[in-house]
């Protein structure tokens, strides 16, 4: 999956001339967590987030002084609190590359740039959602874990076996040492027996009903 398939678009932007108060209002109005900051030509100059903005406000102070400081901070230019020259990506890289970039640099989002303009935004939450969808989490079925032997034909034989017995594989994810299948409950018991008889080792079987995972009886 590519970034363009998952990114939030159209993206909510804020100009570099805006204030902290305007940024917070925009965040709440559009129910977003991050705001790319752009100049008058719509070029990316920074990024900010609701959590970063709220950190600058005073806590546990006298009410009158706190109100004064809050009003002052709300008028602060966004350029004084944004992260300048943020990391950004193009829409045609993979989700894995975007996730690795966010992990390595400990950042929560990446603006997506094409032709020098911000066209989208991808966040850690988006990546987690993609992972959840790839595993079919929250959907009923049977999750089967099999050790992954990296040899030619291993995956194709597995899929052919499922086809042979009319078992629908809803989701399949490969990890470094194992494969996780999400299959329908119909014919699952017969399919599991056939897996074992064809030399596949099944290390875990979990039944999922109404988003709850339970060991299969």
Image: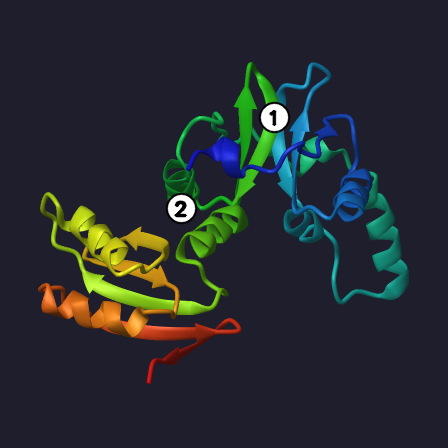
**Coordinates of residue 195 in the picture (x, y in percent):** 17, 65
Q: Circle 2: is it few (<14), some (14-19), or many (20+) Cα within 10 Å?
A: few
Residue at image location 66% in from the left, 33% down from the top: 11
In the picture, the quarter occupied by the N terminus is top left
* 3D distance between C-alphas at marks 2 and 1: 22 Å
**Coordinates of residue 159 in the picture (x, y in percent):** 24, 51
**Helix, strand or loop at mark 1:** strand
Say whether disc 2 or disc 1 marks the residue closer to the N-terminus. 2
- Front-lying residue, 170 or 87: 170
- Front-lying residue, 121 or 217: 217
Whether residue 102 is visible to the viewer of this picture, yes or no, is: yes
Q: Tell me the quarter of the picture where residue 170 sits.
A: bottom left
Q: Which mark is residue 103?
A: 2
Q: Compared to 209, does 199 lie above or below?
A: above
Residue at image location 40% in from the left, 38% down from the top: 101
Disc 1 designates what residue? Answer: 119
Scheme by which the image is coloured:
rainbow
Q: Tell me the quarter of the picture where residue 26 sits.
A: top right
Side of 91 relative to 185 (left or right): right
Whether residue 176 is visible to the viewer of this picture, yes or no, is: no
In the picture, the quarter occupied by the C terminus is bottom left
Residue at image location 18% in from the left, 57% down from the top: 177
Q: Circle 1: is it few (<14), some (14-19), or many (20+) Cα within 10 Å?
A: many
Side of 155 relative to 152 (left or right): right
**Helix, strand or loop at mark 2:** helix
Q: Compared to 212, does 129 lie above or below?
A: above
**Coordinates of residue 151 in the picture (x, y in percent):** 9, 47
Q: Which mark is residue 39?
A: none
Considering every residue shown, the one lying at the far bottom of the view is 217
């Amino acid at each position: 999956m590519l970034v363009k398939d998952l990114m939030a678009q159209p993206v909510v932007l804020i100009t570099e001339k805006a204030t902290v108060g305007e940024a917070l209002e925009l965040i709440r109005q559009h129910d977003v967590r991050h705001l790319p900051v752009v100049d008058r030509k719509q070029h990316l100059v920074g990024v900010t987030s609701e959590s970063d903005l709220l950190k600058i406000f005073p806590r546990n102070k006298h009410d009158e002084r706190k109100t004064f400081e809050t009003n002052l901070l709300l008028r602060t230019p966004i350029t004084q609190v944004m992260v300048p020259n943020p990391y950004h990506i193009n829409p045609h890289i993979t989700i894995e590359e975007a996730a690795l970039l966010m992990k390595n640099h400990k950042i929560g989002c990446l603006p997506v740039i094409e032709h020098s303009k911000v066209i989208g935004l991808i966040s850690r939450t988006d990546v987690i959602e993609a992972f959840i969808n790839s595993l079919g989490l929250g959907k009923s079925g049977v999750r089967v874990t099999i050790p992954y032997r990296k040899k030619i034909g291993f995956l194709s034989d597995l899929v052919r076996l499922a086809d042979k017995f009319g078992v629908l594989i809803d989701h399949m994810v490969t990890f470094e040492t194992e494969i996780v299948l999400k299959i329908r409950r119909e014919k699952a018991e017969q399919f599991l027996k056939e897996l074992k008889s064809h030399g596949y080792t099944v290390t875990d079987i979990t039944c999922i009903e109404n988003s709850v995972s339970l060991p299969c009886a």
